Each structure stands twice: as structure tokens, then as C-alpha cells.
Image (cartoon, grey):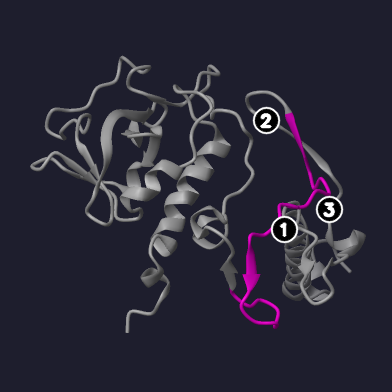
Amino acid sequence: MKLGQITSYIDVAQVTLYLFWIFFAGLLFYLRREDRREGYPLFSEPSNTYKDQGFLFIPPPKVFILPHGGTVLAPNGKSDDRPIKAAKTAVWPGAPLEPSGDPMLAAVGPGAYAERANIADPMHDGAAKIVPLRVATNYAIDACDGDPRGYTLIGGDRTTAGTISDVWVDRSETMIRYLEANIPGAGSRLIPITFARIDKNRREVKVHALFAKHFANVPALASPNQVTLLEEDKVCAYFGAGTLYAHPSRTEPLL
């Protein structure tokens, strides 16, 4: 074979195709293995045990360095052992869950939340990212948008629930994240801005997800001037639960 005549004896295109197949199969295996760092092993309802995925499909633990200090190990072998405040509506695996007790506080369905870190989401300098305007004094609401502070809070039952007392801003994204409401007899509670509709003409903030009686049970904050990641999940989950469980009619079909 003369120099440069390898293509006369080997089908380079076919060899390249085989190498690509081997590489792609290895890439798929690697990606499917890496996405099992969280949420695995899977739980088997029929056997009431965790499925053993074996060493081949579960990757070895890796230490992830967090940007603001600390480390996280994944996979860590921990599972969510919180008691489920619901009962299955049928015996077959995957059957829907019916909340037990107060469905707004059952933390199932649209009211479920993850156990995130109980620390405030920090900015690059370590300061809390989401704070009220009484703390972020260098932020202001444009006059054209209307300042909701002092507006009346109206629930989904068209009943007055309280008064908007402050606005919480995300200083890294320069946007409103929450409204703070003063609920008579309960104190201050946060309302995710995505669940609120501001009516400048009537000076009202309307929240369809909750009725007036529900706002007192919105998860309270440990600190009046910052909200932790866990508290954010709990607050948003409570409003999510209201979209389905605030009234029994919401769990029924429309027709």
C-alpha cells in the first residue's frame, strides 16, 4: 500500500459512522447516568421500597461547590421522608391522592414544595436578593405603574382580606417578586406578584387563588426583612394549593 492510499483499503466513511455511533451511545449513557444524581433511586409503590438501580446506572457521589460558600454532595442517598398528608383514591399504582385534613396545608398536588435551603437567596456580595422597599431604599416604583401600597387586598370570594403595606423587589433582576399585606389578626404575609392583579382605578389588589379567610394561614416569615428559599417555596405552594383547594367546587369538572 502506497503512502496516502489508506482509503483504497478501508471504508473511511463506514468507520467514521461506527465511531460516531459508539461516541453517541457513550454520550447518552453518560447523560442518563448524570441525571440520576437527584431523585433516585425510585420508589416502588407495589413493594413499598426503593428500587435498587445498581452501581452501573447511579453515578458515584460528586462534591459541588456552591457559589456563596458551602458544598453539596450528590447523590447523597437521602430521601424525602416527610409524611404524606393524603390518601390514594384507588389501589392501583399512580392513583391520584386525596388530601387529608386541611387541603391548603397538606403540601400535596399544586401545594407541594421542595425542602430548599432555609437561607436567603444571596447576591454576589452575599446580601439578600429579595427585600422590601423599606430596605431597598434606592429602588422606587414608576409613577405610571401605580404604587400598590395602601391598596385594599381582595380575595377570590370578593371579600376584603387586608391592606398592601409594602412591595418586595428582586435587586438582581430589578423586578417585583412579592407584595406584602397586613392581614388583620395575623400580621404581615407575602403574596407572589404572579398571583396578584393590581387595579389602579379601584386601588385594589385582587387575588383569585385564595379567599379572604385563607390569607391568615399563608406561611409567615422568620425575618421581617428577608425571605429564605424554603419560605419562598412554602408561600408559593400555598397559593398554588388555593387554585385547586380554596373551594370544593374547584376540584370538580367544569361540565
User: What segment carries the magenta color?
Assistant: 71-96
Q: Is residue 245 magenta?
A: no
User: In the structure shown, which secondary structural element does the residue marked by tag 3 occupy?
Assistant: loop
Q: Nearer the viewer, residue 217 or 79?
A: 217
Mark positioned earlier in the residue sequence (3 or 2): 3
> Mark 1 sits on what residue?
31
Relative side of 41 to 121, left or right: right
Query: Dot 2: few (<14), some (14–19), or many (≥20) neighbours within 10 Å?
Result: few
Tell me where residue 128 appears, x and y as whole percent. Answer: 49, 23
Residue 94 coordinates in the image, percent (x, y): 66, 76
Quarter of the image that includes the C terminus: bottom left
Which residue does the numbered mark 2 point to in the structure image? 66
Going by the numbered disc 2, the residue's amino acid type is Leu
Tags 1 and 3 in contact by the CB under 8 Å rule?
no
**Which residue: 23% across, 50% down?**
159
Q: Residues within 10 Å of mark 3 (few under 14, many from 20)?
A: some
Sequence-wise, the earlier of marks 1 and 2 is 1
Instruction: Return the residue at label 3.
Output: 59
